[in-house]
Amino acid sequence: MFKLAAEIIDAHGGLERWKRHDRLTAHLTQGGVLWPLKGQGGVLDDTSVTVSLREIHAGHAPFGTVAARSDYRPDRVTLLDAEGVEIAALDQPRDSFAGHTLETPWTPPQLAYFAGCAMWTYFNMPFLLAWDGVETEQLADREEDGNRWRRLRVTLPSGIVSHSSVQTLYVTEEGLIARHDYDVEIAGGTPGAHYLTDYTEVDGIRLPTRRRIYPRQPDGQRVPEPLVVSIDIDHYVFG
């Protein structure tokens, strides 16, 4: 593992402590322009998410008034009622986004795919850096708003499904992730700059409680408006 990647993992609590757990659940309060833009305003404004720390699997509950919960895996997403009966499903869901732009509306199963894929990545980072096949490269430091951040380019193998295969982490001197850049391939490759703040500690693991995502310009500068997605997180619980 690249030296900076190992330092980042250690700063967030260490791989040994992380591997004691199988899943992570938290309560989310979400906002931003993305949800109404996609025709899904309000569905995930107040929900809880559970992500696996062992495999690519996540789910939200409730899923608005549409379903009691969602179940996301890369090859299939389902929406289920309170008894676990399938309401809707989408096989090979990523294929359904072909030709999409940022403005293309989503169906509820497509929303479940995006939200599951996103939160699985967010909650597993930076420990995802230790997965087989992940490659990292340290880039030149970047200054922003008086902060000087080290940067790590992350290239994910084909078996790890995320927003994009190449992403960039910006880390503080302490080693905590301050910003996470990626391109949302299923929304026409829309570039995002994702900021992480207000860290808390749960069972020795450092976890952010505030996430804000903005558009990103080609030179890496964030566009301050609009706020694409806001995520406030509480009640983290490992299982």
Image (spheres, helix red, strand yellow):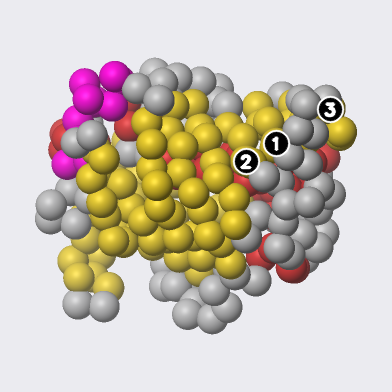
Q: Position of residue 87 (x, y in %)?
A: 87, 33
Q: Position of residue 196 (x, y in %)?
A: 35, 58
Residue placed farthest to the right in the image?
A: 87
Q: Is residue 207 left or right of residue 76?
A: left
Cα separation, mark 3 vs mark 2, equals: 15 Å
Q: Is residue 131 above or below residue 150?
A: above
Q: Position of residue 146 (x, y in %)?
A: 19, 77
Cα separation, mark 1 vs mark 3, equals: 10 Å
Q: Earlier in the sequence, mark 2 or mark 1?
A: 2
Circles 3 and 2: CB atoms closer than 8 Å: no
- Disc 1 crowd rating (10 Å Cα; few below 14, some 14-19, many 20+) is many
According to the picture, the residue beneath numbered tag 3 turns out to be: 86
Q: In the image shown, does 222 or 128 lie closer to the viewer?
A: 128
Q: In the image shown, does 97 or 136 lie closer to the viewer?
A: 97
According to the picture, the residue beneath numbered tag 1 turns out to be: 70
Q: Amino acid at mark 3?
A: Glu
Q: In the image shown, does 10 or 158 lie closer to the viewer?
A: 10
Q: Which residues are magenta?
A: 11-20
According to the picture, the residue beneath numbered tag 2 turns out to be: 60
Residue placed farthest to the front in the image?
A: 83
Q: Is residue 193 left or right of residue 15?
A: right
Q: Earlier in the sequence, mark 1 or mark 3?
A: 1
Q: Residue at x 49, y 26 (%)?
A: 52
Circles 2 and 1: CB atoms closer than 8 Å: yes
SS class, disc 3: strand
Q: Earlier in the sequence, mark 3 or mark 2?
A: 2
Residue 151 visible in image: no
Q: Residue at x 45, y 65 (%)?
A: 212
Q: Amino acid at mark 1?
A: Ser
